[in-house]
Image (cartoon, rainbow, N blue to C red):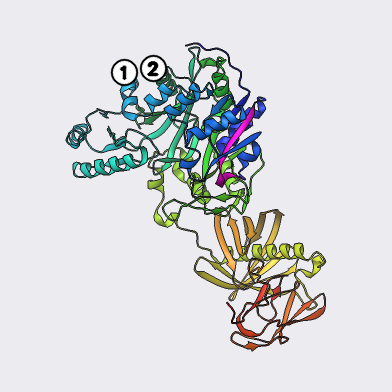
């Protein structure tokens, strides 16, 4: 192959989120301008703000925006882009899109349409790999798709057998069958699922490799006949056949095995005249045998770990190849140094089958430390919508050894403040601290073998956790109070003319509510009363959302953020969300009609004159608050009936705390 040198001046990224931002960072370093495309849901997304230009391409659903090739090509024409980078997902492995881009006279930063088409069908890809001498799992990939033939071939292969959709990926259209009696149903279900997901019901059958590792080789090819590999990544920690944790190099890799797998991957790429970045995925058996699984004709989600251990910018290499240049690397130039681990931070509920979660990212504070890298397209205040993949960010750590990278990852996850939708952050920490992961002795069955339903359940808050949550809520309350009433001296935050107050709380976590109180007699020292138990806590360090507390001879690391009436918090890597049912901030509930009585300032409730059910009239005394050594009467401004009293005598309140609600009888 040969190619004419083609200097790229402006790249349109036909994608969104973290991969769009990732491509833009490299393009900016290379002096190349960028164009973002976005749907209505992504109008304020970081990738839109990061680009030099941005074009709206449609409504939020992907079928009306990111998957509409014509709209993307129109955006390229409108902005004068001369190249398109597809990222991953969406149209990245769509052969027709690649061909259309090139036909329009634009540079497609990826492989040829022919290579995408061939490797996009597992049956055709496997047939080609067998021809090229690449080790493949014994199975059936024939054109006769009748139930009769598939049933016969399955029995011939022997059980357990894997039924797979020939098109697509991500675990859809895939079924593991342990015996002949379950094969017919698995074929029917997999075919139906494949037709719905990929528009093709074609299936292949493969001998199931029991407890393999999932190991992939990163390959790169230019248009001058040079094809090399950049080592391997281990992607064995998966749920629903989707990767959760990836690392480079593979923990059980040897020099000989790497050379053999690398050579097989290079031969696979050469056999289809490949160009650009690609990944050849293998199943690695416990005896060292490996088998071709599939080839991804694009940049992978987990490419950062390869970048970290090779020191190479894979996006820069993609652009270099797309411009018709040589790789500038020979196989002997590739060296691996250190170890890198990547985790995928998903908005998902690990306590409910890993179902996706949506909502506003209330707070996202990242760790700034050597060896820690975030690839993300999300920021605090942004919504996680139901329209797209629930991945919030990729967190990558790199160290001189695997154990150093693992420990750093646990620390980085623990210190990452990520609050709003439910996430898999706690689950990732649990994975990293399992003995099998630490030893490196695991397979694709890792999650099933290491987690019970009880271990995936939400953590229960014991007395110490409740005490920490109460202190964190107490401090957040008073930080907000000071922000609203700057004239309240610091010394009055926890004190009155009497002595240190005990501020009552009723913390609701799920359906459980616990009454307790917080008392601070001197700065950074707190006593929490839970029934007859008293827990003393001392703040040893506090910066932003991060806090280190000590109590009962132990030290605790916590992140916390108060968003509206919800306190999001972590304690040593375990996540909690709770609300104070007694002293809720009423800002979101303020109606302005007098039915919501709020505290006018920070102070102490000296007396209450009403209870639930009392009839009141305008001017009636409701309560007295002491503040700045003065007493202030709270009077009713409407007629009605007391609907609820949310404070008690001797309680401390912050400005705008909801105290009393009144039913005025008006709708």
Nearest the viewer among 57 and 49 is: 57
Image quarter for residue 42?
top right
Nearest the viewer among 161 and 147 is: 147
Q: Which residue is labeled 1 in the image?
A: 131
Image quarter for residue 369?
top right
Q: Earlier in the sequence, mark 2 or mark 1?
A: 1
The answer to whether residue 229 of the structure is visible from this angle is no
Tell me whether the residue at label 2 lies in contact with that at label 1, contact meaning CB atoms closer than 8 angstroms: yes
Disc 1, SS: helix
Q: Which residue is labeled 2 in the image?
A: 271
Relative vertical location of residue 465 with respect to residue 333 in this rendering, above or below: below
Q: Which residues are magenta?
A: 33-43
Disc 2, SS: helix
CA gap between label 2 and label 1 equals 9 Å
Expressed as whole percent of the image width and height from the top left, the position of residue 201 reads 29, 37
Q: Residues within 10 Å of mark 1 (few under 14, many from 20)?
A: few
Nearest the viewer among 246 and 97 is: 97
């Amino acid at each position: 192959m040969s190619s004419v040198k083609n200097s790229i001046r402006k790249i349109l990224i036909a994608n969104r989120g973290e991969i769009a931002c990732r491509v833009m960072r490299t393009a900016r370093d290379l002096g190349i301008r960028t164009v973002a495309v976005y749907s209505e849901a992504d109008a304020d997304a970081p990738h839109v703000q990061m680009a030099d230009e941005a074009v709206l391409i449609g409504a939020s659903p992907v079928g009306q925006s990111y998957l509409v090739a014509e709209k993307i090509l129109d955006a390229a024409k409108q902005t004068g882009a001369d190249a398109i980078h597809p990222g991953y997902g969406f149209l990245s492995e769509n052969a027709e899109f690649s061909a259309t881009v090139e036909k329009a006279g634009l540079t497609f930063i990826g492989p040829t349409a022919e290579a995408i088409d061939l490797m996009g069908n597992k049956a055709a890809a496997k047939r080609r790999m067998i021809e090229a001498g690449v080790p493949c799992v014994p199975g059936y990939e024939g054109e006769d798709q009748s139930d009769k033939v598939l049933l016969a071939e399955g029995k011939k292969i022997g059980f357990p057998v894997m039924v797979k959709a020939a098109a697509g990926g991500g675990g859809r259209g895939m079924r593991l069958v342990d015996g002949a009696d379950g094969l017919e149903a698995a074929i029917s279900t997999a075919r139906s699922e494949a037709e719905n997901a990929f528009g093709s019901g074609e299936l292949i059958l493969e001998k199931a490799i029991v407890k393999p590792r999932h190991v992939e080789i990163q390959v790169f090819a230019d248009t001058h006949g040079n094809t090399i590999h950049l080592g391997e990544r281990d992607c064995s920690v998966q749920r629903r056949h989707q990767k959760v944790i990836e690392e480079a190099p593979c923990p059980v890799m040897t020099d000989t095995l790497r050379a053999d797998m690398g050579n097989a991957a290079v031969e696979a790429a050469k056999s289809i005249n490949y160009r650009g970045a690609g990944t050849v995925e293998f199943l690695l058996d416990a005896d060292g045998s490996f088998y071709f699984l599939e080839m991804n004709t694009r940049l992978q989600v987990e490419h950062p770990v390869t970048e970290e251990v090779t020191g190479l910018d894979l996006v820069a290499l993609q652009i270099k190849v797309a411009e018709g240049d040589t790789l500038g690397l020979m196989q002997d130039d590739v060296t691996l140094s250190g170890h890198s681990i990547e985790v995928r931070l998903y908005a998902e509920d690990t306590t409910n089958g890993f179902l996706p979660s949506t909502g506003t990212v209330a707070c996202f504070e990242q760790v700034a430390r050597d060896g820690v890298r975030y690839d993300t397209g999300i920021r605090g205040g942004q919504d996680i919508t139901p329209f797209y993949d629930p991945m919030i960010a990729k967190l990558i750590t790199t160290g001189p050894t695997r154990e150093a990278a693992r420990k750093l990852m646990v620390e980085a996850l623990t210190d990452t403040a990520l609050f709003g939708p439910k996430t898999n952050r706690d689950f990732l920490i649990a994975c990293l601290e399992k003995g099998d992961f630490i030893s490196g002795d695991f397979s694709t069955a890792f999650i099933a073998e290491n987690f019970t339903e009880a271990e995936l359940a939400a953590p229960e808050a014991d007395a110490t956790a409740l005490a920490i949550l109460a202190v964190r809520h107490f401090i957040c309350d008073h930080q907000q109070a000071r922000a609203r009433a700057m004239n309240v001296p610091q010394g009055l935050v926890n004190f009155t003319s009497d002595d240190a107050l005990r501020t009552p709380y009723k913390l609701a976590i799920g359906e459980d509510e616990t009454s307790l109180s917080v008392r601070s007699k001197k700065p950074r020292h707190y006593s929490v009363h839970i029934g007859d138990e008293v827990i003393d806590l001392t703040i040893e360090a506090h910066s932003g959302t991060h806090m280190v507390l000590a109590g009962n001879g132990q030290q605790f690391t916590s992140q916390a953020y108060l968003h509206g009436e919800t306190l999001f918090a972590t304690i040593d890597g375990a996540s909690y969300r709770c609300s104070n049912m007694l002293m809720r901030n009423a800002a979101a509930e303020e109606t302005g009609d007098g039915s919501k009585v709020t505290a006018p300032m920070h102070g102490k409730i000296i007396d209450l004159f009403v209870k639930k059910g009392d009839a009141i009239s305008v001017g009636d005394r409701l309560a007295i608050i002491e503040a700045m050594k003065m007493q202030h009467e709270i009077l009713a401004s409407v007629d009605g009936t007391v609907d609820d009293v949310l404070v008690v005598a001797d309680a401390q309140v912050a400005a705008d705390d909801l105290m009393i609600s009144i039913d005025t009888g008006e709708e």
